Image (spheres, rainbow, N blue to C red):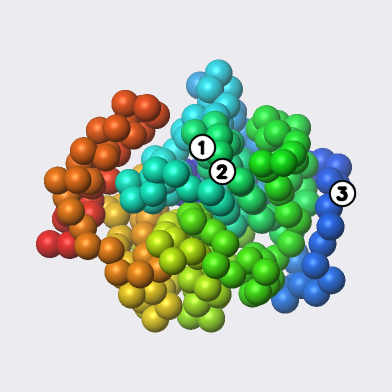
Amino acid sequence: MLIKRKSIEAQANTKAGPGTRQREKKPAVRRKAKFAPVTLSESDGVRYLHFGTEWVQGAMRMRKPDWLELEYAQQMMAWMLFNPTPLHIVQLGLGTGALSKFSLRQFPEARITAVELNPAVVAICEMMFKLPIDDERLAVLEMDAQDFVDDENNHGTIDALQVDLYDATARGPVLDSAEFYTACANCLTEDGIMTVNLFGDHPSYAKNLKAMRFAFPQVISLPEVHDGNIIAIAFKKRHPLDFTALYERAKEIQAATKLPTKSWVNGMKTAEG
């Protein structure tokens, strides 16, 4: 979302043509779908996903396909500090499937749902980013994220909701209203947590924070990483921050996953002043 790399196909001025995965879809789509070509690039053992531009939409290290290569993607897992045993994890915006693949490996008791509007993204994730096929634990839904969070069948069912909804311009989330974030809050369990990938160097950042703070009683922004990504953490109910306990939990997560979790707690502490 933030690293600019020229994609292979963009350089050649061609379009990718992945096949379409068959999925049950919602009959109504709120947004008129206009999909940019899905393109790829590779450098130093890392494969990148683009939407026909230089903006990176996700990445995978070829030798470690389940690892979270980008720092902002690692920070999207900050909810792990508060919930070590989630039962249902949902990703809005599939990207390269990195968050879903990581969650599948780290939480064997959890169900993982990914929601992606563009069928070409799903297809390219299967072919080029080692996304597993659906089974009893993984479901990839081709539908609009707004329709998913509006569906009352999803309300109160999600422990961790990860929102990463960008289009080809990669300058701000495509869903950013108070109504959208209220629907996201409705989908969370009582102790549920949402993480959102925002772009700090853009007017959309303030708009999204305002909308989130309308829908959630507590929102914390981590320090900016890369070229502008900022991860916001929103709690369904206000959560007292015990930093001693959080640092201990961070050590446990880092030992198990090698994620730089201490920096997450440092960021929360800075944000809380």
- Amino acid under disc 2: Ala
Element type at mark 3: loop
**Residue 80's spot in the image, x, y percent?**
38, 45
Residue that label 1 marks: 107
Kindly check if marks 2 and 1 are in contact, taking CB atoms under 8 A apart as contact. Answer: yes
**Residue 17's spot in the image, x, y percent?**
83, 42
- Amino acid under disc 1: Phe
The residue at the point 49 percent across, 64 percent down is: 189
Element type at mark 1: loop
> Considering depth in this image, is 201 or 218 the residue closer to the camera?
218
Question: Residue 203 occupies which quadrant of the picture?
Answer: bottom left
Gap between marks 3 and 1 measured at Cα = 27 Å
**Residue 200's spot in the image, x, y percent?**
36, 61
Query: Label 3 neighbourhood size at 10 Å, few (<14), some (14-19), many (20+)?
Result: few
Residue that label 2 marks: 110
Q: Which of marks 3 and 1 is in front?
A: 1
> Considering depth in this image, is 42 or 137 the residue closer to the camera?
137
Residue that label 3 marks: 22
Up/down of 27 relative to 178, above or below: above
- Amino acid under disc 3: Gln
Q: Relative to residue 184, is residue 28 drawn left or right? A: right
Query: Label 1 neighbourhood size at 10 Å, few (<14), some (14-19), many (20+)?
Result: some
